[in-house]
Image: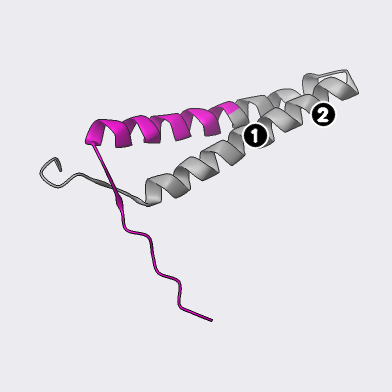
Amino acid sequence: MSPTIAPSPIHVSERFRLTLEATILDLEAGAARDERLLPTLQNDDHRRRHRLLVAAQLNRAFRLRELLSRTSIRPGQAA
């Protein structure tokens, strides 16, 4: 088995990185809020769709976190 080569970092602007971080936090907060709302739903189908919504939000946040871990601020733009 060949060793896995780490991908080179993706150079982004500081503004893009901050936007990405904010989006992740919004998705995670939305998922937490929606998860707390689940017990109040009466209809089984509404609960099922709401769980799908929470799962989609968390999945998107996870993928964006993976992307975030591969980014670095463009050289010359670091604060």
Q: Secondary structure at mark 1?
A: helix
Q: Residue at x 14, y 47 (%)?
A: 75
Q: Earlier in the sequence, mark 2 or mark 1?
A: 2
Q: Secondary structure at mark 2?
A: helix
Residue that carries the numbered disc 1 in the rendered image: 56
In the image, taking residue 23 as reference, residue 27 lies left or right, namely right
Residue 78 image-quadrant placement: top left
In the image, taking residue 47 as reference, residue 60 lies left or right, namely left
Labelled pair 2, 1 in contact (Cβ < 8 Å): no
Question: Percent position (x, y) of residue 36?
Answer: 68, 27
Residue that carries the numbered disc 2 in the rendered image: 48
Range shown magenta? 1-30
Amino acid type of the residue tagged 2 in the rendering: Arg
Residue 46 image-quadrant placement: top right
Give the vertical position of 44 relative to 77 (above or below): above
Give the vertical position of 72 relative to 19 (above or below): below
Give the vertical position of 26 relative to 64 (above or below): above
* The N terminus lies in quadrant: bottom right
Question: Percent position (x, y) of residue 45?
Answer: 87, 23
Marks 2 and 1 sit apart, C-alpha to C-alpha, by 12 Å
Question: Percent position (x, y) of residue 71?
Answer: 32, 48
Tell how many labels: 2
Amino acid type of the residue tagged 1 in the rendering: Ala
